[in-house]
Image (tube, coloured by chain):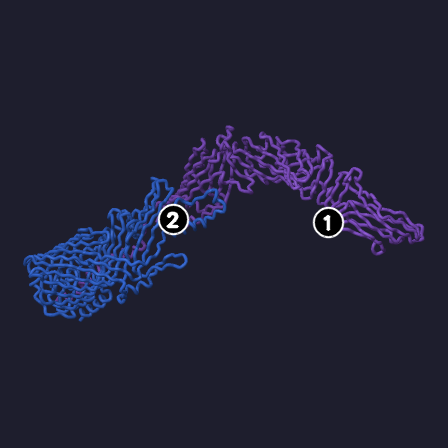
Chain colours: A blue, B purple
């Protein structure tokens, strides 16, 4: 009874937060969790027709270069309670391009129907959110300012190549897979996408260059940020732009519907049983785009300005008014650099991913697996690799352990556990078990989930097909 | 199923260590100290100063620079010294006085006896200097002529009078016809506004005012002791617009003219030497007066602390010509050059309090019989015009100044501002040099710090078109900034001098010379 209460409470929390993250996908890929397996590879067929309501709770955050302990340190002595930013350490650990990536998604509903002639049809509704922020290695150089006083030399303030990208959308996936032969299954998802909110930085170039004798500073910007979010308000009169997120919430809510934010994507996948022991699988997911036409806003700042100080001469000494002079300066700079709005629609590509993996069924209880994953971000091509073992002591339990090269780190141990009941599945997984050492981890991800089978037909013996599918 | 029993504990065991191990660390992130000290350098200001721009001529400019043929700048200075009006010079002539006070007496007739004449000429005599100066015509702004017929008591009389010397504003002679005096009406008054008086037209008529009189008089009294029939004439309340005639030769003492210059020496007690190269300084007299005159200087010089020092090189006597008759509104210009070797520059460099000019006018010095005119609007302007080549030697001028400077706002910056530096680059084309230091002082004028580590020296250019470059740094550390927050005054000392002035070298200032200043600011800020 107590367990039921706990499960109901968990279900309630899960329905509220209702997330599942892809940060754990490398461990999940071979665990046979519904409906994630089909999501990750459209060729995956379940051994029955079913309808799943799958609330879950997850969190996933990763950055390419830094851990808490690489970003901060404690002072010493009397200052041991003070936390300091550790820019020297950050400088040593930053890459040319660095990212912070959060991906949150949840599967609201999945329905699968086993058809004749080896077909398996599916329909799923899910919600996906990607936030991706990149920043250059030169970020930490900002702490030096634009001058090296000891050597009386200038430094360039480099604000190039920052970007903020984020999309929030709902996905309606129509899947169909077919057993081509006893060994090969291919499948595809056609996904209709309904966008809620987007931010896309297409260009971010900004710098302040000071010449060798500090007599001139050259300011330049070339920035373009596309938004589909009603957060910019242009003030009448001075034309300045204010940010106001009050009306953003409506657009973020599930009931928000706009036919102007639409998109389409496809997933393609296969599974191939090489022999009784070895299975191969691969998929390419999220190849598609969303056209954002609802309340599109663009922030554009493009200008150049050469600042060489206030100029005074015999002509303007009389009646010189410093306040007016500075005012005209700031007006000029404002007119050049302050962003202005445009309302052109724009397009964002999804972050396409590919998986290719293999499993080796050592015996009925132990399966070894390997997976290579690649992701195409806007300016980063990320490759990750995982090897793992799944132990299934019986039909209800499965345990998976993994080791991954991920996030430019070899220090990623993963763990997953699945309880497969008659009417529900309970599972937990992480690709980064060492995230328990949060302060030394570059990524944190956890997934706890519950699948409730609202309907399921009679099971077919899963042992006759891919061993890692349940 | 054991696991089922313990699943809640398992989940909590997985979550809680993660949560609690890092909660404190993450909680501190918003308060994490940046612990950085960025350094900034920015251009603050650029300036370009040229003398020719400062003294650019315009229509009303009394002082400007222009380049001479040799490229050397010339300071042109034009200044009126004084404007002399005619009534200051000839107040006796133009003053209010009784011009005519005379009478005509006719023969006495007994009761029932009459005499008459259709036209008899009588000559009256004018008063005042008009006779002496031989003024032959006067244009009047105003004036009164009054006839008083003293016949009404003992005679029946009737008079007609014409005044050929006096015209009204229409140019007609003043005239009365068939006037019968009575007890109530025996005076006639004419307003002479805009009238004209013609007198002294010949040597024979000098001082004569002619009355053309027609009369008819019959005695009506049996008393033998009655008065003769008499007509009295008065002219008075004259405001003369202009006068024409021969003023003759005479002298007028001028009241001394004092022109205020420097109320105090802007350089304090310093004694400087200004040695101008070859200045051209001219005295000009722009004269509208209708008579030539000479001016004999009895005094021209400066007064410094009560002591008079004469300007040398000024002519002792000058002759100022008059515009010719018929050119009354024009000015004659008479120029007198002050000797370039005059001591004027040396006296002026002492910053005297006053300039004083005194002397005596002599009217018509060369021809006492010259025909002159005087008009009330005529003026004479005395003026000085100087063309001073900027070739000079100037010994050290020290400028001491104390200004209020409240730097208490530094208190807001002292925790963060670790270092501030100002770099001033100067390219100086001018052949003058500057030594300077400034001190920050508290409210009791106690020195807190100096602006520069040691007094700066701005070099003067030694060669034309090759500027002397100076690079001046001001550095203030955090400790100094903390001290400067108590600053209330800035005491500055600066010394200017032309290059090699002590060796007597006269330097030239050229039109292309200027002063370029470039100020760059640096700061190191702790966050």
Q: Which residue is mark 2?
A: B415
Left or right for B4, reference B280: left
Which image quarter is the C terminus of chain A in?
bottom left
Residue drawn at point x = 13 percent, y = 57 percent: A282
Q: Nearer the viewer, residue B85 or A270?
A: B85
Q: Find residue B313 and report its horizontal and vertical position in percent.
A: 61, 30
- Can residue A56 be seen here? The reply is no
Give the distance between the C-alpha atoms of the residues marked 2 and 1, in whole angstroms: 92 Å
Question: Would you say the residues marked 2 and 1 are in contact, meaning their CB atoms lie under 8 Å apart?
Answer: no
Q: Which residue is mark 1?
A: B170
Chain holding disc 1: B
Left or right for B217, reference B363: right
Q: Secondary structure at mark 2?
A: loop
Q: Earlier in the sequence, mark 2 or mark 1?
A: 1
Vertical placement of A166 versus B508: above or below?
Answer: below
Quarter of the image for residue B266 reads top right
Q: Nearer the viewer, mark 2 or mark 1?
A: 1
Left or right for B329, reference B501: right
Q: Nearer the viewer, residue A248 or A82?
A: A248
Q: Find residue A63 and report its horizontal and vertical position in percent.
A: 23, 53
Vertical placement of A197 versus B429: above or below?
Answer: below
Q: Find residue B368 and report its horizontal and vertical position in percent.
A: 73, 34
Which image quarter is the N terminus of chain A in?
bottom left
- Can residue A470 be seen here? The reply is yes
Chain holding disc 2: B
Q: Secondary structure at mark 1?
A: loop
Q: Nearer the viewer, residue B479 or A165?
A: A165
């Amino acid at each position: 009874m107590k367990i039921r209460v706990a499960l109901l409470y968990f279900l309630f929390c899960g329905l509220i937060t209702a997330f599942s993250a892809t940060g754990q996908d490398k461990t999940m890929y071979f665990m046979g969790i519904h409906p994630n397996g089909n999501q990750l590879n459209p060729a995956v067929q379940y051994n029955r027709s079913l309808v799943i309501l799958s609330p879950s709770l997850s969190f996933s955050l990763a950055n390419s270069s830094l851990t808490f302990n690489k970003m901060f340190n404690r002072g010493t002595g009397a200052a041991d309670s003070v936390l300091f930013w550790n820019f020297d350490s950050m400088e040593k650990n930053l890459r040319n391009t660095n990212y912070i990536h959060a991906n949150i998604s949840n599967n609201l509903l999945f329905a699968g129907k086993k058809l004749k002639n080896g077909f398996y049809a599916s329909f799923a509704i899910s919600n996906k959110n990607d936030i991706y922020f990149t920043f250059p290695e030169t970020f930490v150089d900002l702490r030096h300012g634009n001058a090296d006083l000891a050597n009386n030399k200038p430094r360039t303030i480099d604000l190039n190549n920052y970007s903020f990208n984020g999309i929030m959308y709902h996905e309606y996936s129509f899947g169909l897979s077919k057993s081509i032969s006893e060994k090969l299954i291919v499948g595809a998802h056609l996904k209709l996408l309904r966008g809620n909110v987007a931010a896309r930085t297409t260009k971010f170039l900004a710098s302040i260059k000071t010449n060798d004798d500090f007599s001139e500073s050259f300011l330049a910007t070339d920035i373009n940020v596309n938004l589909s979010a009603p957060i910019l308000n242009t003030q009448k009169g001075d034309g300045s732009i204010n940010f106001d997120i009050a009306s953003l919430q409506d657009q973020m809510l599930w009931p928000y519907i706009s036919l102007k934010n639409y998109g389409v994507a496809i997933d393609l996948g296969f599974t191939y049983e090489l022999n009784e022991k070895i299975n191969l699988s691969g998929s390419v997911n999220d190849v598609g785009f969303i056209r954002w036409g609802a309340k599109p806003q663009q922030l554009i700042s493009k200008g150049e300005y050469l600042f060489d100080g206030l100029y005074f001469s015999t002509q303007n000494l009389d009646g010189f008014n410093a306040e007016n002079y500075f005012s005209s300066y700031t007006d000029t700079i404002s007119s050049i650099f302050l962003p202005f709005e445009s309302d052109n629609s724009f397009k964002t590509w999804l972050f396409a991913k590919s998986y290719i993996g293999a499993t080796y069924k050592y015996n009925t209880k132990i399966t070894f697996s390997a997976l290579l994953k690649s992701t195409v971000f806007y300016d980063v091509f990320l490759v990750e690799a995982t090897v793992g073992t799944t132990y299934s002591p019986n039909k209800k339990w499965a345990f998976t352990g993994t080791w991954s090269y991920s996030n430019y780190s070899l220090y990623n141990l993963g763990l997953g556990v699945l309880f497969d009941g008659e009417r529900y599945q309970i599972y937990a997984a992480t690709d980064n078990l060492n995230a328990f050492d949060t302060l030394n981890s570059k990524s944190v991800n956890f997934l706890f989930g519950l699948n409730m089978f609202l309907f399921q037909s009679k099971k077919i013996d899963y042992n006759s097909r891919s061993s890692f599918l349940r | 199923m054991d696991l089922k029993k313990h699943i809640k504990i398992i989940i909590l065991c997985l979550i809680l260590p993660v949560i609690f191990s890092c909660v404190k660390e993450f909680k501190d992130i918003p308060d994490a100290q940046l612990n950085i000290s960025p350094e900034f350098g920015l251009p603050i200001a650029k300036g370009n100063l040229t003398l020719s721009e400062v003294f650019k001529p315009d229509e009303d400019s009394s002082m400007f620079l222009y380049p001479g043929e040799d490229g050397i700048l010339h300071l042109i200075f034009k200044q009126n010294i004084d404007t002399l009006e005619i009534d200051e010079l000839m107040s006796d002539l133009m003053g209010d006085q009784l011009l005519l006070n005379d009478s005509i007496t006719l023969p006495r007739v007994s009761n029932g006896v009459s005499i008459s004449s259709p036209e008899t000429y009588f000559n009256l005599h004018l008063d005042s200097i008009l006779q002496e100066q031989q003024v032959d015509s006067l244009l009047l702004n105003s004036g009164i002529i009054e006839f008083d017929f003293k016949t009404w008591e003992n005679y029946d009389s009737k008079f007609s009078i014409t005044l050929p010397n006096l015209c009204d504003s229409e140019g007609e002679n003043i005239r009365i016809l068939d006037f019968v005096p009575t007890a109530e009406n025996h005076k006639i008054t004419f307003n002479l506004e805009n009238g004209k008086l013609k007198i002294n037209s010949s040597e024979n008529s000098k001082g004569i005012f002619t009355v053309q009189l027609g009369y008819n008089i019959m005695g009506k009294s049996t008393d033998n002791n009655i008065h003769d029939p008499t007509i009295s004439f008065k002219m008075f309340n004259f405001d003369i617009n202009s006068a024409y005639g021969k003023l003759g030769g005479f002298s007028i003492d001028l009241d001394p003219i004092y022109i205020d210059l420097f109320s105090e020496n802007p350089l304090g007690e310093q004694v400087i030497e200004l040695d101008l190269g070859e200045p051209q300084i001219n005295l000009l007299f722009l004269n509208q007066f209708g008579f030539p005159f000479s001016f004999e200087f009895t005094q021209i010089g400066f007064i410094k602390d009560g002591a008079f020092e004469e300007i040398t090189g000024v002519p002792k006597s000058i002759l100022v010509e008059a515009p010719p008759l018929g050119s009354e509104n024009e000015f004659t210009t008479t120029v007198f050059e002050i000797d370039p070797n005059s001591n004027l520059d040396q006296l002026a460099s002492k910053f005297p309090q006053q300039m004083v000019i005194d002397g005596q006018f002599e009217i018509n010095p060369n021809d006492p019989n010259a025909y002159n005119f005087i008009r009330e609007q005529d003026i004479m302007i005395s003026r000085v015009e100087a063309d001073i080549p900027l070739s000079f030697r100037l010994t050290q001028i020290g400028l001491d100044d104390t200004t209020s400077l409240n730097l208490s706002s530094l208190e807001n910056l002292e925790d963060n501002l670790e270092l501030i530096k100002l770099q001033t680059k100067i390219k100086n084309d001018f052949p003058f040099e500057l030594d300077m230091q400034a001190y920050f002082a508290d409210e009791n004028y106690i020195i807190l710090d100096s602006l520069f580590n040691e007094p700066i020296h701005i070099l003067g250019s030694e060669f034309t078109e090759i500027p002397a470059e100076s690079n001046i740094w001001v550095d203030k550390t955090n400790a100094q900034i903390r001290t400067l927050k108590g600053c209330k005054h800035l005491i500055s000392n600066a010394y200017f001098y032309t290059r090699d002035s002590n060796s007597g070298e006269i330097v030239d200032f050229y039109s292309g010379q200027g002063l370029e200043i470039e100020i760059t600011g640096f700061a190191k800020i702790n966050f």
